[in-house]
Image: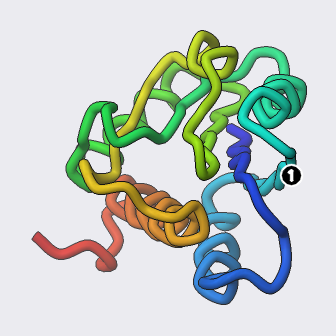
Amino acid sequence: MNIIIISPGKSKGYLGEDIVLEYTSRISHYSSIEWKFISAADIKEEGEKIVKAIPEKSFLVILDEKGKQLTSPGFSDFLNKRLNESTKNLVFVIGGAYGISDAVKEKAQFTWSLSTLVFPHELVRSILAEQMYRGFSILRGEKYHHE
């Protein structure tokens, strides 16, 4: 399974970049992972660029505070289900300052809430990368996650 994370903003020199790089390296032991960065003038343009960046045969997850909340083991189960379904591309979209466009929302198969709080996209990158690593480590029965 290929994991693709689409995020607004710059690809270098952002807050938390070292965290994202560390967890991306760890995740790469379980799955291929690619970050795509989108810059746009407004939500409409951003949405158009995101839709173009989503490969065919993808399972699309958008991150939104109104989505479904999952525990870390619940997210691990979500990853396992995608693996068992032989999902080719698991795509996560992080919204920009004005959220996620309707064009992207219409394509989503799942809306995930990391919290009912709203976070800046740079912070969400770090949280998502860490939770993805945690999810895979739970699947493998590794000692990273403690209950």
| Quadrant in the picture for residue 14 | bottom right
Colour scheme in use:
rainbow
70 or 45, nearer to the observer: 45
- Say above or below: 26 vs 140: below
Residue at point 66%, 36% (across, down): 91
Q: Residue furthest top?
A: 106
- Residue 24 is situated, as x and y percent measured from the top left of the image, at 66, 70
Q: Is residue 105 left or right of residue 5?
A: left
Give the residue displayed 45% in from the left and 67% down from the top: 127
Residue nearest the observer in this picture, 75 or 114: 114
Question: In terms of depth relative to the viewer, which is nearer, 108 or 75?
Answer: 108
Label 1, secondary structure: give it.
Answer: loop
Question: Which residue is located at x 34 percent, y 42 percent?
Answer: 65
Residue 70 vs residue 147: left or right?
right
| Residue corresponding to mark 1 | 39
- Residue 125 locus on image (x, y percent): 58, 64
Location of residue 29 with respect to 46 vertically, above or below: below
Pointer 1 local density, CA inside 10 Å: few below 14, some 14–19, many at least 20? some
Where residue 102 appears, as percent x and y from the top left, is 61, 17
Where in the figure is residue 122, as x and y percent of width and height? Answer: 60, 69
Q: How many marks?
A: 1
Seen in the image, is 106 located left or right of residue 32? left
Quarter placement of the N terminus: top right
**Residue at x 71%, y 52% (from the top left corner):** 7
Q: Quadrant of residue 144?
A: bottom left
Kindly identify the amino acid type of the residue bearing the numbered disc 1. Ser
Q: In the rendered view, would you say 35 is above or below 18?
A: above
